[in-house]
Image (tube, coloured by chain):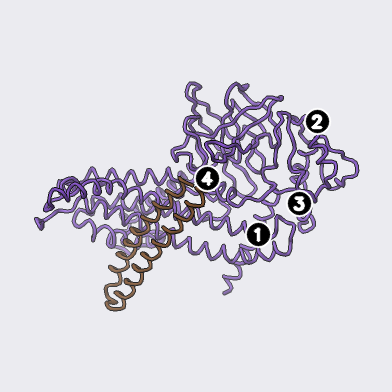
Chain colours: A brown, B purple
């Protein structure tokens, strides 16, 4: 039973991270379209932000590992 | 397109041969199917080996054993006379090759033993493939590695893992000084056990599902002369996440991961030494050979990561950042090489833990006054807000390296597991060899999926090395940043 709850928790965490990374990616595309000359800066910032969003999801997944 | 076709057939061949090797782990059911499909004579030996260990108490007459090699079977540890009646009855009306029931038998210690590989368990196979081992297996070849094992009060044992005389699954046929090998990993026998080499026989180590604190866990045992000995895993720092104990014995061995790490480090050392030399001898000239391959990557880390984030202090941290980047990238790519051990070094929590601790120490040792002031006493905030902000900032100090550790571990481990599970689909759809057509059909699909996944993983190998370097740089950057009084 605890395993199932942990799996649901991990799934919820992934939904949150997916929305977050999707927004980061989408906004970065918009920014590149507006200012194509700033593509280098925008790309590295996009990856940095995506990595930070991912961090929260990873902690949730790890917690679900320990519980489940 | 031509290249794609060549790659496809290469991977298809590789997938199928992998599948066949794995089928050897399954029951006779799968094997008989395989014998029809597979004309490879070399497999017969292994097939015979397997059929030998559930014969205790069986009536041999009437069974078709043609094609199975009975000579040379080791029945020690199987007590024919003691074999209990229940098992005998089960064996009497089962037909070899069709009934799943005969995969279990009762050994001399009175434990019912299920052939650990009779049922395909995708989760267990995936976890087995991502974990560290004491043997280095490349395809069917097994290379012994030195074992350095320390038991509290028992001293240090130093010997080669070849002493265990491991079979194809990495299960040792012999015990040495109270240590055994199970699925490529050294485990220890608890309690009194004769030291030196002790013959255990084929598949002498077995798991019994036991309930511990309401959770089902596998406990390992071996049976020697009718006495049952419990077997425990090595101590690990992953809090038993991958089945390790906490207070058993410590493994300082040169495991598969350590050997992979040494290979990659030596490779990087000699490569960068020659590149560094080339910059001296060919000063003012255009880069050549490996030098021109590596120069853009080095310049990329310098100009895109170090300079914008660290400002004018970048030269102090550039060596660390480059080392981190190439170490992680090298090991990510080394783990990607199919059939070269598939070592999962950067997907090992202990390795990423050490990398994260390095980032943590460098950040905090180089942290200036402003950095610590912003953590413990954020300027410009009213007192009651500080009581909330300070604990959060303090936790942030540790959460930053923690996510660094988990991100690399998670991404690389997930990549390795997904590939193993795609290959595992062949057995799930092919029903362990019972449905050959579905198995071969899935093999084609699984090959395509594996190819796709491997190209994604190639991208991930670069991205994760870059992200780790970038984040380390930004953490260091926030610690060494000069603050104007803008608060």
Q: Which residue is mark 4?
A: B131
Whichever of labels 4 and 1 marks the residue nearer the N terminus, that label is 4
SS class, disc 2: loop
N-term mark: 3 or 4: 3
**Residue A16 placement, left or right of B308:** right
Please name the residue that numbered disc 1 is placed on. B426
Same chain check for tags 2 and 4 = yes
Q: Quadrant of residue B164?
A: top right
- Using the image, name the chain to which the residue with label 2 belongs: B
Judging by the rendered image, the residue that carries numbered circle 2 is: B80
Examine the rendered structure and indicate whether residue A36 appears above or below residue B34. Answer: below
Q: CA distance from mark 2 to mark 1?
A: 37 Å
| Quadrant the C terminus of chain B occupies | bottom left
Marked residue chain, label 3: B
Mark 1 is surrounded, within 10 Å at the Cα level, by few (under 14), some (14 to 19) or many (20 or more) other residues, namely many
Between the C-alphas of marks 3 and 1, the distance is 15 Å
């Amino acid at each position: 039973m605890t395993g199932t709850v942990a799996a649901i928790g991990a799934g919820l965490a992934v939904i949150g991270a997916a929305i977050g990374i999707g927004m980061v990616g989408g906004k970065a595309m918009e920014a590149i379209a507006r200012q194509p000359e700033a593509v280098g800066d925008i790309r590295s910032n996009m990856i940095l932000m995506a990595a930070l969003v991912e961090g929260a999801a990873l902690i949730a997944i790890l917690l679900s590992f320990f519980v489940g | 397109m031509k290249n794609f076709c060549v790659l496809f057939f290469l991977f298809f061949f590789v997938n199928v041969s992998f599948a066949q090797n794995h089928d050897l782990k399954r029951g006779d059911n799968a094997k008989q199917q395989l014998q029809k499909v597979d004309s490879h004579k070399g497999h017969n030996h292994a097939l015979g080996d397997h059929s030998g260990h559930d014969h205790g108490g069986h009536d041999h007459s009437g069974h078709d054993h043609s094609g199975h090699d009975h000579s040379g079977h080791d029945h020690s540890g199987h007590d024919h006379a003691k074999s209990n009646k229940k098992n005998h009855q089960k064996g009497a009306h089962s037909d070899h090759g069709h009934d799943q029931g005969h995969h279990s038998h009762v050994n001399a210690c009175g434990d019912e033993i299920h052939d650990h590989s009779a049922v395909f368990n995708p989760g267990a196979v995936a976890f087995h493939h991502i974990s560290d081992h004491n043997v280095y297996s490349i395809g069917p070849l097994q290379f012994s590695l030195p074992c350095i094992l320390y038991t509290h009060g028992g001293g240090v044992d130093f010997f080669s893992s070849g002493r265990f005389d491991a079979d194809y699954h990495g299960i040792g046929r012999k015990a040495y000084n109270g240590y055994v090998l199970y699925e490529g990993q050294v485990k220890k026998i608890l309690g009194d056990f004769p030291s030196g080499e002790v013959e255990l026989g084929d598949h002498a180590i077995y798991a019994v599902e036991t309930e511990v604190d309401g959770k089902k866990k596998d406990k390992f045992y071996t049976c020697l002369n009718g006495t049952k000995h419990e077997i425990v895993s090595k101590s690990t720092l992953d809090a038993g996440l991958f089945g390790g104990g906490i207070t058993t014995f410590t493994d300082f061995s040169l495991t598969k991961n350590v050997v992979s790490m040494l290979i990659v480090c030596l490779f990087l050392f000699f490569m960068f030494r020659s590149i560094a030399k080339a910059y001296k001898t060919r000063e003012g000239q255009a880069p050549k050979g490996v030098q021109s391959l590596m120069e853009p990557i080095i310049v990329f880390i310098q100009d895109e990561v170090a300079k914008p984030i660290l400002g004018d202090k970048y030269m102090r941290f550039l060596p660390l950042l480059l080392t981190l980047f190439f170490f992680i990238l090298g090991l990510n790519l080394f783990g990607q090489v199919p059939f070269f051990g598939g070592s999962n070094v950067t997907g090992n929590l202990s390795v990423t833990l050490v990398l994260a601790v390095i980032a943590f120490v460098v950040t905090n040792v180089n942290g200036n006054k402003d950095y610590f002031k912003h953590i413990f006493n954020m300027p410009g905030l009213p007192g009651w807000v500080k009581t909330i902000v300070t604990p959060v900032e303090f936790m942030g100090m540790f959460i930053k390296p923690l996510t660094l550790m988990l991100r690399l571990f998670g991404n690389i481990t997930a990549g390795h597991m997904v590939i193993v599970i795609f290959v595992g689909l062949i057995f799930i759809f092919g029903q362990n060899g019972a449905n050959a057509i579905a198995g071969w059909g899935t093999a084609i699909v699984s090959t395509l999926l594996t190819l796709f996944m491997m190209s994604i993983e190639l991208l991930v190998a670069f991205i994760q090395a870059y992200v780790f370097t970038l984040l380390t740089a930004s953490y260091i950057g926030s610690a060494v940043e000069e603050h104007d009084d803008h608060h």
